[in-house]
Image (spheres, helix red, strand yellow):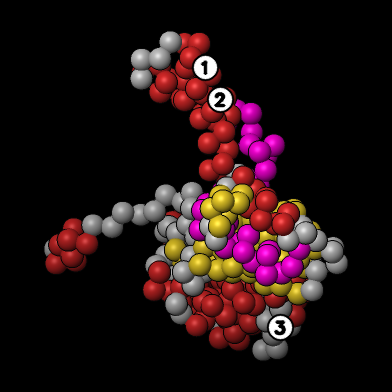
Amino acid sequence: MEITASMVKELRESTGAGMLDCKKALTESDGDMDKAVEWLREKGIAKSAKKESRIAAEGLANIFVDGNKAVILEVNSETDFVSKNSEFQKLIDTIGKAILANGAKTMEDALAIKLDEGTVEDLIISKTATIGEKLSFRRFELVEKSDNENFGAYLHMGGRIAALTVVEGASEEVAKDVSMQAAAMYPRYVFKKDVPQDVVAKEREILKEQAMEEGKPEDIAIKMVEGRLNKFYKEVCLTLQAFIKDGDLSVEKYVANNGGKVVKMIRYEVGEGIEKRQDNFAEEVMNQVNGN
């Protein structure tokens, strides 16, 4: 029986499987739609569906730059072992370059990008089945700069941490120094003005309680809080941090000394904010021995 494009489209819409998988399923099922759905369930799609409840908190972050555009992204896997898999690394490479080429701004747009074989979403589903672990395209950001600005891109621990910065008026080398700083020192904000007021208020309350517990009178404690709050800003704001290559300079001063200023910083640490599964290896072995 001839497998038409409309049949492939119908099966794809009902199952979410990739076009090539749908075509193969229909061919194997002699065009019977119900049998094709069952075939997909028995193969990769069933495997992929079973993995949805698993936790993917490992993986890699990466940065791709093309002229005045750059993308930073994170793709997760269940185990660190898979992050060293060449197929997994090719997947990240394909996604990153596709986003740069298409200018996707949202996750919906990125997943819908058409590749040689289906979409980015199709590719992730296919690789989930092939690699054998739940894979998750967690996040990305596409950044554009002007000709007077430079990107700084730095990967730490092979992609466990990725930092992308933009500096205006200074060299790419300076921008990379700033991204290394961001990777190493974990700033949560770029500038003091970026710190939300509720975060400042909470920190001020904590610092006041600490000072009071030290036996200081309330009026003295309040004065101490402001000094300690400045220390807090120097820890969490990139531009106020002591520069790792010269502790006598702040990052802001270092960049200014090189004729520039920091514009933007994005830092991804793989798995941050994801509640990781706590495996009990002994219990797992016993369950297998007991047939559970």
- Label 1 and label 3: CA atoms lie apart by 63 Å
Q: Would residue 139 be visible to someone looking at this image?
A: no
- Pick whichever, 77 or 189, lies toward us: 189
User: Residue 282 falls in which quadrant of the image?
Assistant: bottom left
User: Residue 212 falls in which quadrant of the image?
Assistant: top left
Q: Is 111 situated above or below 98?
A: above
Q: Reply yes or no: does residue 179 show up in magenta.
A: yes
- Pick whichever, 4 or 43, lies toward us: 43
Q: Work out whether mark 2 precedes mark 3 in sequence or the reverse, and give the earlier one.
A: 3
The residue located at (53%, 19%) in the rendering is 223
Q: Which quarter of the figure is the N terminus placed in?
A: bottom right
Dot 1: element: helix
Disc 3 marks which residue? 116
Q: Is residue 195 left or right of residue 57?
A: right
The answer to whether mark 2 and mark 3 are in CB contact below 8 A is no
Q: Give the image location of residue 160, x and y in percent.
A: 48, 65
Magenta span = 170-199
Disc 2 marks which residue? 226
Q: Main secondary structure of the magenta part?
A: helix
